[in-house]
């Protein structure tokens, strides 16, 4: 690392870190057993929450200088926040991590390629839903046009690194661009109306996982919700926030607050644990902005995961059925650690006739997806995934249910890597629930 | 910084993967759980086995390099802070349970095994390893032995020392010694097992330990007693013991502590009480029922306004887990928590609690008190801010007075956390000048070059001249 860059990063740490929060860590070490990277690195303190906080504080205090090893420690963190619920001192590690990444990446001299890629993704792509639609439809074109088949037949696909190749295989069949563009803005309840909610559709969820969004809306209708889907909403900004692009994340936050605050709704529903936790955090993100602070707090308070509202509305008491099978659940880290929602998905799954639920060991440990972590820190991600798949296999589950698109793709990737695609499937909770509901309905009507 | 030739020698022993001296690693091993102490080592080495340990010790001895053996760094006396630099030694590769001997009721372990895993392995075969320090989920047995850790079950079952039957130690001169063994009786020479237990790594490196296990108690029962003031609660503790009942656990928590613990654990602790006793008894079913009934009566007679008995094992476990989080949870209130563990004879608990409150008032500082009241081991915890130098000076004066008071009541400056460097200035209060002299001579005899965790327990600079 160059001298100039060191100075810049150190200065940025002094300016950007919340020193009081750093001081809150008593270094008791209670977080250590919860940290996937601490475990996977053979108990290396450098890759533990306590160690990372000490490094951040060390940089601010001037005890150490920035270095490649320090940066690696911050990079290798999954950001899963499993350390937060077990911290007796209540340290908000997720916030510290975002500040540290902001300090490193807003000043870091990245390579030209890294810089261009980051700038393209964070500034040009994710802030604009129409561009995401276009990018996603390219994948759709690749899948539908026969190009995918050609790539596989000609073995051209082998030019792509192995892990990405597997990733390409597990991408869902994406809808046509025309379909992505024609989204409803108002939907009325099918069951007697009990709540009026807004739906946060999410950038990737509303393109690559469009059918899951449709299923979410359907479930809300069956549960008795009128749904409004503001057209002006944008990407939640989580990918930006977690990668040290705070300014961009704040812009997205403001756009979303504006898009939703006019709607008189009880809740804003999300179906992606990662987005939900970040939306929930807008209040913190904009805490220093006098004009936005209260508006952000009002917004954050309304955020609710789909599983949580379904339990509120007793969806689990409806007739639900699937073919007899063993089912297991992989927690979404941010749904559990960020929004404290982990009982509800299990309760819903167990309410389905035909489900034999088996909890896997360490179900709440991160699967290694973690946003774009499985691409940028591929080795560690795959190591973590291998552990996860061992636990999945021990349950003998046919279906792995998840509550976040990143986790879903990662579990599909795990199934693919283990050669289990004939016997095991990964599904989003809402798709599974809708199937269970409609299957029963069909039975009743026929 | 290590001399390049020495660095190469270490690398030749353990290889690149087990020797680190980049700045991130040095910082990550520059602290333990003790507030206000930090110092960078020169390198962090992870030996693969005891032969590696011996080879490393030999090099350190030859070149006068300090060695700091470290488990998970959860101690509270700055015992593993590498104050004089040197090598931090980790035991993550020496983490095997070697044997559970069901004939002799012993377990032989390497130093890197987690305390919790020892407890669980014993439970699996119907046996019991009682010592349960607050950090047992992450602490390593090597650290527990070196600090002679206590815990919540100390009252009835004693501390780590009571369960160490034998040790294998690499001495500073590189020789191995074996002390004790799978023996109920052994009076061959000085009790070296007890000498190395609680030596805080100042006399050698523990490479193996034989632990005593006992039959698992049939059943346990947990209860809470709530009081309107601290003194009544403290008096109740003395009365329970005077009534010839020894519960497993007899913990004391004041109101601020109960409030923060409840804030973290959310298990419905009674935050309206000024003081709470958390009591657990184990043993045969009839005995437990009888003891809990008697304790309940005693609590009520002494002025408890409510007595609650945990109905399920989960409730009981939640209470104990919540208690273990007390120290860290207190840090929610202020940036810095300074914890002490002054200990007095059980009969003096009420006096000590009173004295702590008076001293806190005198120096105008906030002290919350919780602890193992049943064994006289209190944890007065000062909530402060390390950045406020003027207040920190008052805190130090207050603690000095607390230590003096404890010793004057027939107590000690530290019941279970160890001296380390944190309580080194107060050691003379407890052991006197003659005691200091003996400790120095023992240290000099075993570690003449003062390479083993220098600066802990005893200051050698005075005698070295």
Image (cartoon, helix red, strand yellow):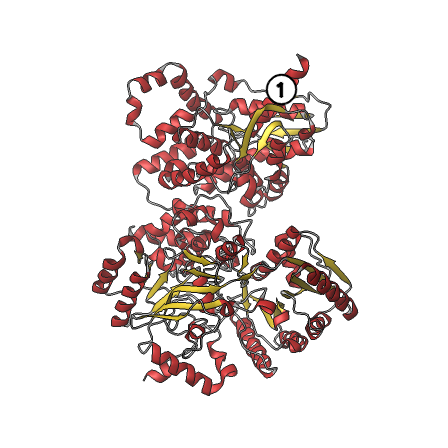
Residue A161 in percent (x, y) is at 31, 31
In-front residue for pair A110/A273: A273
Question: Is residue B300 left or right of B267 when viewed as pictured?
Answer: right
Question: Is residue A353 left or right of B164 when viewed as pictured?
Answer: right
SS for callout 1 = helix
In-front residue for pair B273/B446: B446
Count all numbered tags in the image, as a single digit. 1
In-front residue for pair B196/A127: B196
Residue at x 71% of width, y 69% of height = B233
Q: Quadrant of residue A78?
A: top left
Please determine whether, in this image, residue B304 is positioned above or below residue A49: below
Residue farthest along the top direction in this orientation: A446
In-front residue for pair A194/A425: A425
Q: Quadrant for the C terminus of chain A, please.
A: top right
Q: Quadrant of residue A257?
A: top right
Q: Quadrant of residue A317?
A: top right
Residue that carries the numbered disc 1 in the rendered image: A438
Residue at x 40% of width, y 20% of height = A138
């Amino acid at each position: 690392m160059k001298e100039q860059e060191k100075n810049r990063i150190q200065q940025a740490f002094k300016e950007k870190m919340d020193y009081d929060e750093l001081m809150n860590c008593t270094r008791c070490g209670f977080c250590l057993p919860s940290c996937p990277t601490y475990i996977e690195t053979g108990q290396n303190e450098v890759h533990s929450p306590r160690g990372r906080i000490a490094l951040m504080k060390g940089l601010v205090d001037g005890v150490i200088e920035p270095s490649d090893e320090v940066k690696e420690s911050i990079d290798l963190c999954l950001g899963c926040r499993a350390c937060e619920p077990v911290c007796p001192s209540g340290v908000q590690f997720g916030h510290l991590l975002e500040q540290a990444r902001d300090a490193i990446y807003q000043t870091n001299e990245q390579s030209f390629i890294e810089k261009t890629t980051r700038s393209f993704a964070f500034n040009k792509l994710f802030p604009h839903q129409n561009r995401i639609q276009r990018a996603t439809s390219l994948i759709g074109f690749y899948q539908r046009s026969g190009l995918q088949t050609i790539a596989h037949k000609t073995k051209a696909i082998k030019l792509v690194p192995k892990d990405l190749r597997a990733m390409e295989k597990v991408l869902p069949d994406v809808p046509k661009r025309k379909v992505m563009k024609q989204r409803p803005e108002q939907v009325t309840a099918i069951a007697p109306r009990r709540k009026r909610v807004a739906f946060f559709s999410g950038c990737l969820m509303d393109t690559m996982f469009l059918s899951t969004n449709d299923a979410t809306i359907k479930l809300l209708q069956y549960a008795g919700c009128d749904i409004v889907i503001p057209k002006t909403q944008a990407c939640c900004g989580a990918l930006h926030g977690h990668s040290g692009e705070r300014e961009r994340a704040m812009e997205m936050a403001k756009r979303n607050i504006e898009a939703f605050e006019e709607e008189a709704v009880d809740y804003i529903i999300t179906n992606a644990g990662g987005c939900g936790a970040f939306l929930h955090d807008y209040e913190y993100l904009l805490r220093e902005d006098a004009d936005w602070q209260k508006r952000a707090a009002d917004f954050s308070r309304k955020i609710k995961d789909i599983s949580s509202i379904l339990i509120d509305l007793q969806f689990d008491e409806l007739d639900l059925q699937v073919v007899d099978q063993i089912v297991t659940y992989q927690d979404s880290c941010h749904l559990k650690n960020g929004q404290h929602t982990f009982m509800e998905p299990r309760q819903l799954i167990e309410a389905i006739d035909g489900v034999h639920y088996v909890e896997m060991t360490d179900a709440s440990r991160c699967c290694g997806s973690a946003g774009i972590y499985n691409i940028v820190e591929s080795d560690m991600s795959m190591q973590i995934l291998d552990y996860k798949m061992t636990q999945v296999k021990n349950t003998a589950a046919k279906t792995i249910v998840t509550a976040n698109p990143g986790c879903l793709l990662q579990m599909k990737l795990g199934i693919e890597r283990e050669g289990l695609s004939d016997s095991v499937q990964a599904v989003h909770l809402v798709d599974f629930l809708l199937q269970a509901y409609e299957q029963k309905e069909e039975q009743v009507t026929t | 910084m290590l001399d390049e030739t020495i660095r190469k020698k270490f690398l030749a022993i353990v290889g690149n993967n087990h020797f680190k001296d980049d700045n991130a690693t040095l910082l990550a091993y520059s602290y333990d759980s003790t507030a206000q102490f930090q110092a960078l080592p020169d390198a962090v080495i992870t030996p693969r086995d005891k032969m590696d340990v011996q080879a490393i010790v030999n090099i350190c001895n030859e070149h006068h390099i300090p060695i700091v053996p470290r488990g998970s760094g959860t101690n509270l006396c700055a015992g593993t802070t590498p104050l004089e630099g040197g090598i931090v030694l980790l035991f993550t590769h020496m983490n095997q349970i070697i044997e559970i001997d069901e004939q002799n009721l012993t377990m032989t372990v390497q130093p890197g095994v987690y305390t919790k895993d020892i407890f669980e392995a014993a439970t699996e075969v119907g046996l019991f390893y009682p010592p349960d320090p607050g950090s047992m989920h992450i602490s390593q047995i090597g650290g527990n032995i070196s600090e002679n850790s206590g815990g919540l079950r100390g009252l009835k079952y004693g501390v780590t020392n009571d369960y160490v039957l034998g040790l294998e130690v690499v001495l500073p001169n590189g020789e191995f010694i074996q002390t004790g063994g799978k023996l109920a009786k052994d009076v061959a020479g000085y009790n070296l097992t007890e000498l190395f237990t609680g030596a805080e790594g100042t006399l050698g490196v523990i490479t193996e330990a034989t632990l005593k296990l006992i039959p698992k108690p049939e059943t346990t029962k947990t209860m809470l007693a709530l009081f309107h003031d601290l003194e009544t609660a403290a008096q109740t503790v003395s009365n329970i013991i005077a009534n010839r009942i020894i519960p497993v656990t007899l913990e004391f928590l004041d109101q601020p502590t109960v409030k923060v613990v409840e804030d973290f654990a959310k298990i419905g602790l009674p935050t309206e009480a000024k003081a709470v006793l958390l009591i657990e008894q184990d043993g045969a079913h009839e005995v437990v029922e009888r003891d809990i009934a008697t304790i309940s009566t005693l609590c009520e007679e002494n002025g408890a306004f409510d007595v609650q008995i945990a109905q399920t094992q989960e409730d009981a476990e939640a209470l104990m887990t919540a208690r273990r989080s007390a120290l860290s949870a207190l840090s929610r209130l202020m940036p810095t928590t300074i914890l002490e563990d002054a200990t007095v004879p059980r009969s003096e608990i009420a006096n000590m609690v009173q004295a702590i409150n008076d001293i806190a008032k005198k120096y105008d500082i906030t002290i919350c008190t919780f602890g193992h009241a049943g064994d006289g081991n209190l944890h007065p915890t000062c909530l402060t801010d390390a950045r406020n130098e003027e207040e920190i000076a008052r805190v130090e004066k207050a603690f000095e007075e607390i230590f003096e008071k404890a010793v004057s009541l027939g107590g000690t400056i530290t019941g279970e956390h160890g001296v380390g460097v944190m309580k080194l200035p107060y050691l003379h209060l407890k052991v006197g000048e003659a005691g200091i002299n003996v400790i120095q001579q023992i240290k000099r005899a075993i570690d003449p070059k003062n390479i083993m965790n220098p600066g802990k327990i005893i200051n050698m600079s005075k005698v070295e001249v």
